[in-house]
């Protein structure tokens, strides 16, 4: 009788372990894209500090992310903000007007890093690419350095929930990312004697390839300056493809052209219209002409 019971128990145990493994949530994988060491300047915004792809193994949701700041740069002396983005548009980081801004990090001085809470970002099984950027104050410490680090996961208190003092990535259902310490490139901050950095200006509406059965459109976009000045002017170029451009001054929706608009009426229907944008700050630094946005106005 014992000979029969023992194999049966072992078989049941084997099945139980197999079922438990099948039902267990997958572990998260993280792939860090290499960044090169770089010099950044006082007043520069949205400087890319971390480029990573989170791969949960099944559809999931990113709730919290903690990133440590290494180097000599100090919070609110050299660095004033950190932002989390999800990749959108062309592959890789483009920033405002293209990638999806998920939120700003909360600085935790005791941990020397940022906690990005309540992210609520969908992460498909195959993975999603995220970026973390930092903003540099206009008059930082010369030659201060910063390096962003994704630390080994640490869940000290409530299991699968982020509490102050925890580290790493927290997803809704997947097991915490069992990554080793992952460190990105070193950014060296350099003071500038005068603002020589041009603004970033982009069209957000309409999107490239849009079609409208009318002779009018509203064009909207975003802008931000770098170097400590402010955006003074945004101009939109409008033309039929292959024809001369007409330049129109945009109207700010909020001070500093953070968002702006241009209203166009009486456009020639039955044509493809090309839209391009540029911006200029109060020091005369002008951005390069943006990529064309093509729209079609049907009869």
Image: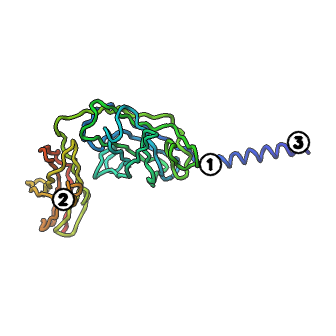
Left or right: residue 222 versus residue 169 is left
Give 123 or 133, whichever is nearer the viewer.
133
Foreground: disc 2 or disc 3: 2
Left or right: residue 110 versus residue 88 is right
Q: How many marks?
A: 3
Q: Which residue is mark 1?
A: 24
Residue at image point 30% right, 44% down: 46
Which type of secondary structure does the marked residue at label 2 adopt?
A: strand
Q: Which image quadrant for residue 293?
A: bottom left
Foreground: disc 2 or disc 1: 2
Q: Are marks 3 and 1 in contact (CB under 8 Å)?
A: no
Reading the chain from its start, which is encountered first: label 2 or label 3?
3
Residue 170 image position (x, y, % from top left): 51, 47
Estimate the spatial distance between the alpha carbons at disc 3 and disc 1, rounded to whole Å.
32 Å
Which class describes the residues within 10 Å of circle 1: few (<14), some (14-19), or many (20+)? few
Which class describes the residues within 10 Å of circle 3: few (<14), some (14-19), or many (20+)? few
Reading the chain from its start, which is encountered first: label 2 or label 1?
1
Left or right: residue 248 versus residue 82 is left
Estimate the spatial distance between the alpha carbons at disc 2 and disc 3, rounded to whole Å.
85 Å
Which type of secondary structure does the marked residue at label 3 adopt?
A: helix
Q: Which residue is mark 2?
A: 252
Residue at image point 21% right, 69% down: 213
Q: Are marks 2 and 3 in contact (CB under 8 Å)?
A: no
Estimate the spatial distance between the alpha carbons at disc 2 and disc 1, rounded to whole Å.
52 Å
Residue at image point 20% right, 46% down: 199
Q: Which residue is mark 3?
A: 3
**Coloration of the structure image:** rainbow
Residue 294 image position (x, y, % from top left): 20, 56
The image quadrant where one finds the N terminus is: top right
């Amino acid at each position: 009788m014992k000979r029969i019971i023992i194999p049966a128990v072992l078989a049941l145990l084997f099945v139980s372990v197999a079922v438990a493994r099948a039902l267990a949530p997958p572990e998260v994988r993280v792939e860090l894209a290499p960044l090169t060491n770089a010099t950044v300047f006082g007043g520069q915004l949205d400087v890319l500090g971390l480029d990573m792809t989170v791969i949960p193994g099944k559809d999931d949701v990113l709730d919290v992310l903690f990133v440590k700041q290494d180097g000599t740069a100090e919070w609110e002396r050299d660095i004033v903000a950190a932002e989390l983005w999800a990749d959108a548009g062309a592959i890789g980081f483009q920033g405002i007007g293209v990638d999806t801004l998920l939120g700003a990090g909360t600085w935790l001085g005791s941990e020397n890093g940022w906690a990005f809470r309540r992210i609520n970002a969908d992460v498909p099984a195959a993975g999603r690419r995220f970026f973390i950027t930092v903003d540099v104050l206009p008059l930082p410490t010369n030659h201060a350095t910063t390096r962003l680090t994704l630390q080994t996961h640490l869940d000290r208190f409530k299991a699968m929930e982020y509490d102050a003092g925890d580290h790493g990535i927290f997803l809704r259902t997947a097991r915490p990312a069992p990554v080793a310490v992952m460190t990105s490139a070193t950014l060296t901050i350099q003071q500038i004697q005068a603002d020589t950095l041009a603004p970033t200006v982009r069209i957000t509406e309409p999107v490239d390839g849009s079609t409208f059965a009318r002779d009018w459109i509203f064009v909207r976009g975003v802008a931000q300056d770098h170097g400590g000045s402010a955006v003074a002017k945004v101009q939109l170029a409008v033309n039929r493809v292959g024809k001369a451009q007409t330049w129109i001054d945009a109207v700010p929706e909020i001070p500093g052209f953070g968002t702006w608009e241009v209203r166009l009426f009486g456009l020639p229907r039955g044509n493809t219209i090309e839209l391009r944008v540029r911006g200029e700050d109060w020091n005369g630094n002008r951005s390069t002409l943006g990529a064309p946005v093509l729209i079609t106005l049907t009869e």
